[in-house]
Image (cartoon, rainbow, N blue to C red):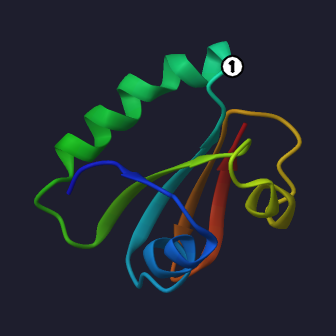
């Protein structure tokens, strides 16, 4: 599996909230320098886990999806959530 870029709230529900496995979700923005530094790491993680159907690497642009940023109380980016079955296990900001 490659890196999944979220394009809608419905896609986020399908790809993350309803996914029974582990999802690593990167909340980011194009103008954010530290966010751009994380992008290669997220791509490498996606490549490393491409054969594992129980792992997803997901990107959410907070400028395009402020409703998701608000729902997850994103106040600083990059914010990376480790989630399983729709539940947040850990957050790294």
Q: Is residue 14 left or right of residue 89?
A: left
Question: Is residue 18 shown above or below 34?
Answer: below
How dense is the environment of label 1, judged by Cα within 10 Å: few (below 14), some, or many (20 and up)? few
Q: Nearer the viewer, residue 66 or 48?
A: 66
Residue under the image location 58 percent in, 80 percent down: 86
Q: Secondary structure at mark 1?
A: loop
Would residue 73 appear left or right of 89 to someone viewing this image? right
| Residue at point 83%, 35% (across, down) | 76
Task: List x then y, in percent, for residue 61.
Answer: 62, 44
Quadrant where the N terminus lies? bottom left
**How many marks can you see?**
1
For the residue pair 81 and 5, the one nearer the viewer reads as 5
The image shows residue 11 at horizontal and vertical percentages of 50, 73
User: What's the residue at 89%, 42% (across, down)?
Assistant: 75
Where is residue 49? Give x, y as percent. 21, 52
Residue 57 against residue 13 in the figure, above or below: above
User: On screen, 80 above or below 17?
Assistant: above
Q: Where, by quadrant of the figure, is residue 72 drawn?
A: bottom right
**Residue under label 1:** 31
Most distant residue in the left direction: 51
Q: Looking at the rendering, which quadrant does residue 44 occupy?
A: top left
Residue nearer the viewer, 79 or 2: 2
The quarter in which the C terminus is drawn is top right
Q: Is residue 19 left or right of residue 71?
A: left
In-front residue for pair 38/14:
14
Q: Position of residue 71 (x, y in %)?
A: 82, 67
Q: Residue at x 38, y 77 (%)?
A: 21
């Amino acid at each position: 599996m490659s890196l999944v870029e979220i394009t809608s709230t419905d896609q986020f529900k399908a790809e993350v909230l309803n996914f029974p496995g582990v999802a690593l979700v990167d909340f980011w923005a194009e103008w954010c320098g530290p966010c751009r530094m994380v992008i290669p790491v997220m791509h490498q993680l996606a490549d490393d886990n491409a054969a594992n159907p129980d792992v997803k690497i997901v990107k959410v642009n907070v400028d395009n999806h402020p409703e998701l940023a608000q729902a997850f109380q994103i106040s600083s980016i990059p914010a990376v959530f480790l989630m399983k079955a729709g539940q947040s296990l850990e957050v790294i900001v």
